[in-house]
Image: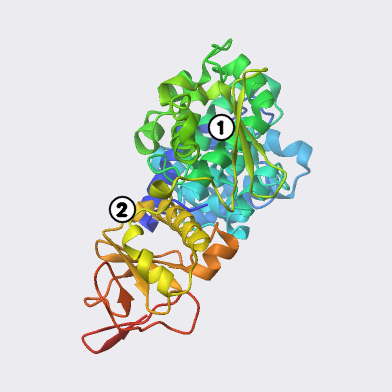
Amino acid sequence: MDHQLLDEATYARRFRELIAGTESLHAHAQDVGDGKATIGWGYTFNRNNNEAIWRDSGIGLSDGQWQRLRDIDQAASSRKTALGLDFGRTLNESEADRLLIASSPSYQTYADALALPDSRERLALVSVTYNRGVGAMKDHPVLGAIEAGDRAEAWYQLRYNCWGSNATAEAGLRKRRLAEAQVFGLYDNPDQVGRDEALSVLGMAEQRREAMDAVEKRFGQTIDGTDGKRDLVALANRDYPAITEAFGEVPTLREALDPARLALLSHLRAEHPAHAEALADDRVDVKDLHVRPGQTKGDWNVTIGDGPNALTLPMNRQTPAVNERAAAPLLPELEAPLQAAGHDGATRQQIGHAWQDHLQRHAHLGPADRVLLSRDGQTLAGLHGPLMSEMHIPTALSRFQWQPPEEQPRQLPQVVEGWVERGADRLAALSPVAGEIEAWSNGVRQR
């Protein structure tokens, strides 16, 4: 899972927009239906450190109000609400903002534990923790999914399994989770969905189909397009304009899965060209796609349709049956150098598969303008404008789903040497460290 990063100022602004956009401003303390005393942007007095938070906020209070905060802090849980409702202070929007900032560190607990950077993912997790409370989120499955880097499962947990337990407020809570799931995102980039991400998303959808449809029948639209009893998606897009402007409108389930559908069909057509016509975009509805794990870890079986006429196609993680042209973009020109480096025909085909996967993982860099092969035949590099991505061949062949050792692409040196390019014969300059390339530019060593 690649985090969708935000700079510090943008994160702070989006955090305020997200909380203020989903929590009404309560100018004075009141019970909003959950049995707690709430003021400002959802701040509750039902805690033991009110005085410290209010002092950090810098909001001016009378001696009597400071004493009331101390009384609430020392009171039993059963008395905190009554004491908080009698607080007697009115807040304006600016003061509510200051109280939000002062109280927010306690809701960062899980985001900090997961080492989430300032990002959309962190925003979504902090927002749901702010709304539900730190205790309610303890050991929630969404935390395990984020820790495992399983974006699709984390999205499912946020959208469908994180609303809470207050049945009288269920619709409103689920509406908010729709917005938070949109902030989190189902894809690293919905415009650049790779093979594995498509399989992950649709595999999740198959596993969770029954649970998702049960919710959608009540509050949205099922995977087959049947409208539910209520349309919370439309309400979320109506009621959270600042959030949808910043993060995009909340999609229906079918709309959310469509980027994965289109990406998967594209790869299926490449890997199974004999069925290309049946796999056309306009012939396969998302409800008819069933993605299930194969017998070997990393293998998948994709079934289109149901019953005796269903078509089942394998998608093997290690050796996908991709036709050579689709499997090895830009590699035909390197056939001779790859062969000279000792790679036989089958290995060259596997290198093509791995290279295609590598390009999909680095699609955010744009297409590779040139492809280079190190003199020792152990590393491929793609030049994406001013950037360079690298694939260590032995590592890629052993794991295929290779993760690059460093996520940030390096700036391309002014002079790229040590590579065999199409029709070019360059000197070797490959580091002994696997996958790390050394190049010299104007006499300065670049790593």
Helix, strand or loop at label 2? It is loop
User: Which label number is shown at residue 366?
Assistant: 2
Helix, strand or loop at label 1? It is helix
Determine whether, in the image, residue 259 is placed left or right of residue 419. right
- Figure coloring: rainbow
Amino acid carrying label 1: it is: Arg
Above or below residue 10? Residue 385 is below
**First-in-chain label (1 vs 2):** 1
Residue 131 occupies quadrant? top right
x then y, percent, for residue 30: 59, 29
Amino acid carrying label 2: it is: Gly
x then y, percent, for residue 80: 71, 39
x then y, percent, for residue 327: 43, 50
* Residue 218 visible, this angle: yes
Label 2, residues with CA under 10 Å away: few <14, some 14-19, many ≥20: few
Q: Nearer the viewer, residue 90 or 351?
A: 351
